[in-house]
Amino acid sequence: MGSESGTAGAAGVDRTPSPDADVCVVGSGPAGALLAHRLADRGRDVVVLEAGPRFSMDDREERMERHIRGTGSVWGMGGERDAFASTGEQAYPLNAARVKGVGGTSLHWQGMVMRLHERDFEMQSRHGVGVDWPIDYDDLRPYYAAAERAFGVAGASDNPYAPPREEPHPLPAFPPSHSDSIFAEACERLGIDMHSVPNARNSEPYDGRSPCVGYGTCKPVCPSGAKYTAESHVGKAEAAGARVVDRAPVQRLEHDDSGERVEAAVYATPDGTEHRQRAEQFVVAAGGVETPRLLLLSESPQYPDGLANSSGLVGRFFMDHCYAGMGGRYDAPTRQKHVGFNTSETHQFYDDETPVEGMKMEFLNYAGPSPVMEAVRADTWGDELLGRLKDAYGTHIAMGALVEQLPREENYVGLDRSTTDDHGNPVPEVHWSVGDRTKQALERANEVQRAVLEELGVDVEWAVGPGNTGPAFHHMGTTRMGTDPSASVVDPDCRSHDLENCWLVGSGVFPTGGAMNPTLTIGALSLRAADALDAELSE
């Protein structure tokens, strides 16, 4: 799919605006790519503007080696282009887990894809916390199934705590790992149910992509292409007639004189030229940080606080999933690192009422140091290196968990006007903190993890919990969905309350975040928004 070299402008690639676009999509991650493909496949004239470059599949092994050797950013993040500020009680390392390029952050995601539970849509009604979504699980069920087919999800119907399904997963689940079998002994004694993990990676050939061959570096790079990336649907969209313009970062959205419609997306090209892309409809799919940033950058005399922001909530209620983990040594071989992703988990504690914050427990297949990384980064050889590898590899075992963070208005994404990017725009400011309720849920997750590990006789060597938790880099809540324009940014179809032709898709629209990895829900909502947008174009 081209190269990262940045010579596309010099090579004569046309980055001038499309003349007759029905839809302009900003961003080519899963949200933008799925929506663009569905609309292009229905005959709509679609142009996608992507801030970053195209990355070639041919250099994925080199990127893997770069990761293993620790010799620089795998996907080129950093520098003035990607500057940001972190101002909350807890530091937020934004660039640690985002990618700017065709395919977006799906280029380096872990690839786990779960549906939200029914309770996640009704947190206020059921538990008196957060807010209710304006849609429920049944509204998303057909779109969840469509997103699973699009991603090629490998899974099994063996989770007794999952919401109801309408059809099996497209691919069979990956078998339990060796370390899963170790955990199973303790979980059986403790009455904890284990079940498979739905993964957006091929357990057998699917959609023109190979099955997983076990490179084990799923995050940050899959050299085989077995793991889904949004490049797949970018290619499908282009085959259906869509136009994708890379290295075209959108600087602002401009509205018409009435202030009721977006008129153009103003974007820059590598040669320094700015262009105005006009369209009937505009979709911003730039993620939970860059989407609100773009809206705030699009201020005007009519909208001094930014576009789509009559509620004052653009960027507010920023949520993430908090991590809890624990691990140590086990007195038997664990075969750590043989699998680069999780194959077993438990949702048994997800719907508990104390605490009401959801938690998803994970049995990790990648505990402890990587022997390959230890070897290639070592400054010793021979017996000394062998001894180090024997000490580092083969007996580590660990559990992880994602814990729900309820929406808090004081957590936000804003603009740091004291620092600018390579185009002179204020960089994103992430203000993030972890509240007492979330810390209590993290404590509960650690309690379960310690019980399992102690049942196995593991010598616990490390723990991540309330005092040292970090984010899972699931950016949610910053353009929340609702029916009341004074208390939300978009309506249930993901259309802005303020501008009739501006749609915002991605995890920013989540009113609450649950504790499930968000990408499957992103995909389902994007496909649902595409149907609503297509109907709008047909009127």
Image (tube, rainbow, N blue to C red):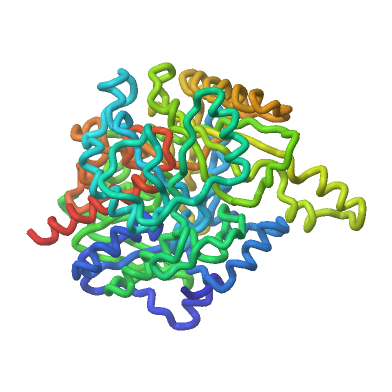
Q: Is residue 118 above or below residue 45?
A: above
Residue ID at (71%, 32%): 328
With 95 as the anchor, is 37 left or right in this view?
A: left
Q: Quadrant of residue 139?
A: top left
Q: Residue furthest right?
A: 383
Q: Is residue 281 above or below residue 163?
A: below
Q: How many marks?
A: 0
With 117 as the anchor, is 346 left or right in this view?
A: right
Residue 47 visible (yes or no): yes
Residue 419 visible (yes or no): no
With 200 as the anchor, is 301 left or right in this view?
A: left
Please provide percent x and percent y for residue 35. 29, 58
Q: Residue furthest left?
A: 539
Residue ID at (50%, 42%): 473
Please provide percent x and percent y for residue 515. 43, 34
Q: Nearer the viewer, residue 308 or 220?
A: 220
Residue ID at (87%, 54%): 379
Q: Nearer the viewer, residue 146 or 529?
A: 146
Please provide percent x and percent y for residue 273. 42, 70
Q: Nearer the viewer, residue 511 or 428?
A: 511
